[in-house]
Image (cartoon, coloured by chain):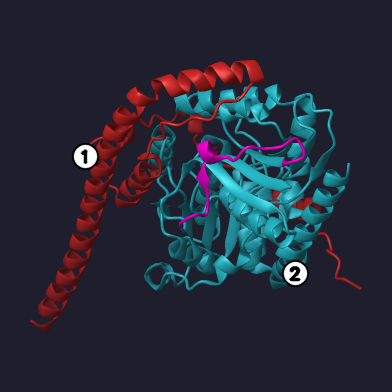
């Protein structure tokens, strides 16, 4: 029996691709004949990591296609044409209303993705969702099939690599270092992080630095507005390193004192787990999947008024007991999101699904 | 027994912070993001500003998408499949040379962009070394 994974783009370093690669290892360990098929394959990936979707072999009715849905693509419609059982892994799609003011094409793509997800509602027989939030999203879209929650399988070994020394050398020193990672996109509300930082810098730590790490490609209009916001607020030490190498991302995690997330839409939010891994205490606004990913750890705020968030950063920086408790909780949560427990969960789900 | 998460009483801390904000009079109103106009910055961004990270990203995208497949699997009912396969077979003689030409062009275009990217990176290293040397020499003066 074949258990194949299909997705639109397999790339280097993004959460969906990493999840696919990690699941591939598990499927191999489980003894299935498996493979990854994608419309677009990043040339930096080792040869034969994935094959073009056109190379998908003939499938029998007992074979399984694990389909990763995260964006708008014709595949969302074509996937049901394969004569196999379809298991959907839903990574969520950004609501288009966030993107529409800045990039019409990106908003249309997301709308197409949501239409595709709705189209599949009565066509798949089992779903895995990255979070309870994603599960709820599927149910609201009319999915009646069984849905289980499986956190993203993260390749933690990658984080053991050496961080970029030049970045560390450049920014180490006095001042609280506040970090947020993730592509520059309006659903992530970077403007709220900047506003909170402006308050923190003004009232608590004039030497503080803010690093907003992530690519702004496709969101130039939003990025430009963020730059204008920083300028008009008159706040200094806000850094946008842009699309950077992995060792540089690691360096920012090594530097960070606080991870601040004020995003209003996340299907899982891998950066929260990355911050947990590096023992960076997390302050996050309670929206969508964020509370679920933190799982009771971090500091989850029900509101994000900038003075209040600034006060919370200060509290975390000035109260060692609180900081220790937050980091301790994050370590416990990280164990639940580790490779072994998530792998076991996936194996159990797969066995039950294949038996059914 | 496995360690358990001891929840932080966030609401209590927030209440204390609210009180502190009130006492210290931290009540300046923040500029609304909605009122900001980023058109000037956008103009700068989309003009002649070189961004190596962005170039690397688009070159990677180009590498990923440079090869076009002529063959596309057919799916559907057995009846529809049969006709689609016949059409594919009939068009093959025409499609393959066109796609081959396109792939040859794509490959050259992608290679030249990769070369350009490598050249820029190489030059940046050389410039960084030269700047370092200039700094050392100037410090010696």
Q: Name the residue that disc number 1 marks.
A: B48
Establish if A233 lies above or below B14: above
Colour representing chain A: cyan
Q: Nearer the viewer, residue A76 or B76?
A: B76
- The quadrant holding residue B70 is top left
| A205 horizontally vs A266: left or right | left
Please give the letter of the chain rendered in red. B
Q: Nearer the viewer, residue A293 or A312?
A: A293
Label 1: element kind:
loop
- The quadrant holding residue B68 is top left
| Residue A250 visible within the image | yes
Q: Pointers 2 and 1 in contact (CB under 8 A)?
A: no
Q: Name the residue that disc number 2 marks.
A: A328
Establish if A240 lies above or below A257: above
Q: CA distance from mark 2 to mark 1?
A: 48 Å
Q: Main secondary structure of the magenta part?
A: loop
Output the chain of dot 1: B
| B65 horizontally vs B52: left or right | right
Span of residues in magenta: A47-63
Relative image position of residue B36 (x, y in whole percent): 43, 31
Q: Is residue A54 magenta?
A: yes
Label 2: element kind:
helix
Relative image position of residue A220 (x, y in whole percent): 39, 36
Q: Nearer the viewer, residue A307 or B3?
A: B3
């Amino acid at each position: 029996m074949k258990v194949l994974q299909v997705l639109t783009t397999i790339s280097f370093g993004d959460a969906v691709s990493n999840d696919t690669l990690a699941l591939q290892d598990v499927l191999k360990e489980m003894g299935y004949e498996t493979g990854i098929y994608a419309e677009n394959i990043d040339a930096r990936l080792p040869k034969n990591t994935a094959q073009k979707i056109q190379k998908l072999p003939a499938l029998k009715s007992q074979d399984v296609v694990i389909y990763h849905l995260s964006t708008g693509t014709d595949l969302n419609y074509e996937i049901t044409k394969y004569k196999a059982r379809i298991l959907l892994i839903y990574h969520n799609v950004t609501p288009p209303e966030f993107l529409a003011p800045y990039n019409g094409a990106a908003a249309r793509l997301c709308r197409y993705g949501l239409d595709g997800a709705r189209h599949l509602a009565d066509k798949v027989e089992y779903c895995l969702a990255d979070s309870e939030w994603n599960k709820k999203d599927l149910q609201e879209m009319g999915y009646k099939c069984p849905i289980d929650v499986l956190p993203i399988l993260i390749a933690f070994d990658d984080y053991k690599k050496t961080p970029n020394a030049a970045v560390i050398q450049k920014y180490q020193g006095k001042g609280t270092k506040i970090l947020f990672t993730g592509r520059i996109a309006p659903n992530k509300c970077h403007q709220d992080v900047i506003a909170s930082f402006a308050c923190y810098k003004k009232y608590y730590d004039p030497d503080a630095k803010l690093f907003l790490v992530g690519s702004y490609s496709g969101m130039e209009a939003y990025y430009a507005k963020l730059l204008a916001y920083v300028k008009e607020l008159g706040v200094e030490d806000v850094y946008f390193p842009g699309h950077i190498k992995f060792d540089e991302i690691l360096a920012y995690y090594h530097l960070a004192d606080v991870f601040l997330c004020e995003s209003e839409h996340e299907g899982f939010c891998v950066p929260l787990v990355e911050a947990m891994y590096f023992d960076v205490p997390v302050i996050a606004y309670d929206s969508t999947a964020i509370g679920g990913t933190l799982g009771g750890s971090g500091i989850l705020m029900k509101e994000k008024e900038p003075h209040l968030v600034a006060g919370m950063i200060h509290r975390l920086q000035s109260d060692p007991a609180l900081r220790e408790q937050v980091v301790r909780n994050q370590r416990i949560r990280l164990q639940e999101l580790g490779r072994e427990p998530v792998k076991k969960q996936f194996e159990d789900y797969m066995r039950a699904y294949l038996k059914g | 027994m496995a360690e358990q998460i001891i929840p932080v009483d966030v609401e209590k801390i927030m209440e204390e912070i609210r009180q502190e904000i009130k006492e210290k009079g931290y009540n300046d109103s923040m500029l609304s993001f909605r009122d900001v106009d980023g058109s000037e910055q956008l103009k700068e961004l989309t003009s002649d500003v070189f961004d190596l990270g962005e170039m690397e990203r688009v070159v990677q995208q180009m590498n990923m998408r440079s090869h076009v497949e002529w063959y596309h699997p057919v799916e559907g009912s057995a009846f529809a499949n049969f006709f689609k396969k016949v059409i594919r077979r009939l068009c093959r003689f025409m499609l393959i040379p066109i796609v081959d030409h396109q792939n040859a062009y794509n490959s050259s275009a992608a290679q030249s962009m990769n070369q350009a990217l490598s050249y820029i990176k190489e030059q940046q290293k050389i410039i960084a070394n030269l700047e370092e040397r200039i700094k050392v020499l100037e410090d010696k003066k």
